[in-house]
Image (cartoon, rainbow, N blue to C red):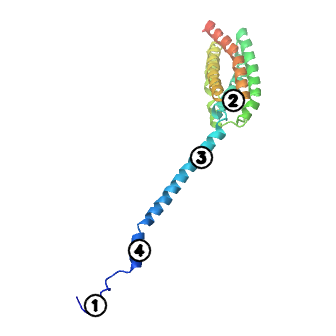
Amino acid sequence: MNPQQDPNQNQYPIDYLNQISSQPTQPTMNNKLVFALIGGFILLVIVAMFALMSTTSGAGPIQKMQTLSARLTTLQKISSDSQKKIKSGALRSTNSSLAIFLANANHEMVEPFSKNGVDVKKLDKNIVAKENGEALTKKLEDARLNAVFDRVYSREMTFQLETTAVLMKDIYDSSKSKALKEYLKKTDEGLQPLKKQLSEFNAANG
């Protein structure tokens, strides 16, 4: 050792040692902050989800209601257009009742559908296109050209009313709206005897 060297020259100041000892705590504080932010964000998302569920739980099945509206409108038009093409007096009578009933059903749906978020005059264009009845109209025209219109019409309309009844039941079961349920129940009860008459005609002439 150099006798002239200061013995305290290689010693570190106390402040420096304190700084070293305090440094490891900084990442811990940062981690806690990050975890707190993540936890808060997750909680916010959960709360938002519950809020969304609570505001939409009473809403009707919008897409299915639009499908029903578009379908009943199409069936009304097809039944009205087909009246003059039907040869059987019995089938013509049944179809006349069907066309009138569908016209009333389309009129009566406006209010209960509106209360459940569906404006029947502003339906989704894709749903309207899907339910435009183009394929059914073509099939009926082919039947007319082949002189089997009555038989094909009664069969196809029976099928259409059956699938419509299933759709209405689906909407009924998933809805909490009293007005909508009453409309669906009344409409189904009115269509059932007409469907039965169409089915019986088809069975007798099939």
List the residue tagged with mark 4.
18
Quarter of the image containing the N terminus?
bottom left
**In the current view of this chain or complex, which residue is farthest to the top?**
204
Q: Amino acid at mark 3?
A: Val
- Reading the image, the residue beneath label 1 is 5
Identify which amino acid the numbered label 2 is placed on. Ser
Q: Tag 3 or tag 2, which sits nearer the N-term?
A: 3
Q: Nearer the viewer, residue 19 or 122?
A: 19
Viewer-nearest residue: 161 or 165: 165
Q: Report, in whole angstroms, how far the alpha carbon at label 2 lies from the one at label 3.
A: 35 Å
CA gap, disc 4 and disc 3? 45 Å
Q: Amino acid at mark 1?
A: Gln
According to the image, label 2 marks what residue? 69
Q: Is residue 5 above or below residue 83?
A: below
Tell whether label 2 touches label 1 (CB within 8 Å): no
Label 1 or label 2, whichever lies nearer to me, is 1
Q: Compute the Cα span from label 4 to label 1.
A: 26 Å
Mark 2, secondary structure of its residue: helix
**Label 3, label 1: how many angstroms apart (C-alpha)?**
69 Å
At x 61%, y 31%, the residue is 130
Q: Quadrant of residue 88?
A: top right
Q: Residue at x 77, y 23 (%)?
A: 104
Look at the numbered discs 4 and 1 and tell me whether their residues touch, using CB distance below 8 Å.
Answer: no
Q: Earlier in the sequence, mark 4 or mark 1?
A: 1
Task: Kindly indicate the quadrant of the structure image that contains residue 153.
Answer: top right
